[in-house]
Amino acid sequence: MKTFGGPALFLDRSDINTDEIIPAKYLTEITKEDLKPYILEDLKLPGFDPKGPRTKSARVVVSRANFGCGSSREHAPWVFEVNGITAVIAESFARIFRQNMFNCGMAAIELPKAELDQVFSHANDADAAISIDIEAQSLTMSGGGKQKTFSFSLSPFDKALVLAGGWVDYADKNY
């Protein structure tokens, strides 16, 4: 079974769009793997380096509201997938981006703003990591010598997609 979680990358802004996740000029690449070096290339945030060690080691992205807005392309979740990112945690997601995450077997987890603020309190911890239990629908934020667990909910179908490894694997097992 796929492991969800690991080192966290904090993107402290709402409305991060699919062009910032993977610039449109790379949409002609032939394979998902070809997208890998361009993750978050056009995202502008103070102190953020898309080529930096935190980006390269990240397995979870934490952001604010309306994550993945913009174009309805699968390339945005794909670039996370090929970079080893298994989950994005935000207050809310653009509908199509969210479903594309589940279809690719990755978790799109929504937390209320107050809980998300608690997760963001670890943004400067060098050891910030998040472990995610899809079955139990809980995540544990650890960093700076502290730990806190949060519950989240997924619809039964979205949970089944994630646990199966995505839509194709789900369909192979069920149809």
Image (cartoon, rainbow, N blue to C red):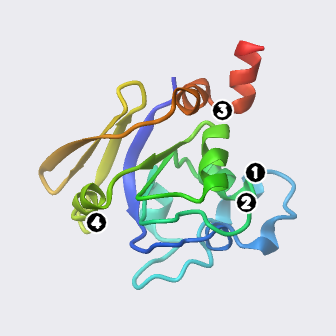
Disc 3 packing (10 Å; few <14; some 14–19; many ≥20): many
Residue where numbered disc 1 is placed: 32
**Disc 3 vs disc 1: which is toward the camera?**
3
Residue where numbered disc 2 is placed: 35
Residue 164 appears at what percent x and percent y? 61, 24
Circle 2: residue type: Leu
Give the residue drawn at x 30%, y 58%: 116
The answer to whether 111 appears left or right of 17 in the picture is: left
Residue 13 appears at what percent x and percent y? 43, 74
Please state which of residues 87 and 155 is positioned toward the viewer in this rendering: 155
* Quadrant housing the C terminus: top right
* Element on which disc 3 rests: loop
Residue where numbered disc 3 is placed: 166
Give the residue drawn at x 61%, y 40%: 102
Circle 3: residue type: Gly
Res. 127 image quadrant: bottom left
Circle 1: residue type: Lys
Q: Please report whichever mark, 4 or 2, sits nearer to the chain's N-terminal start.
A: 2
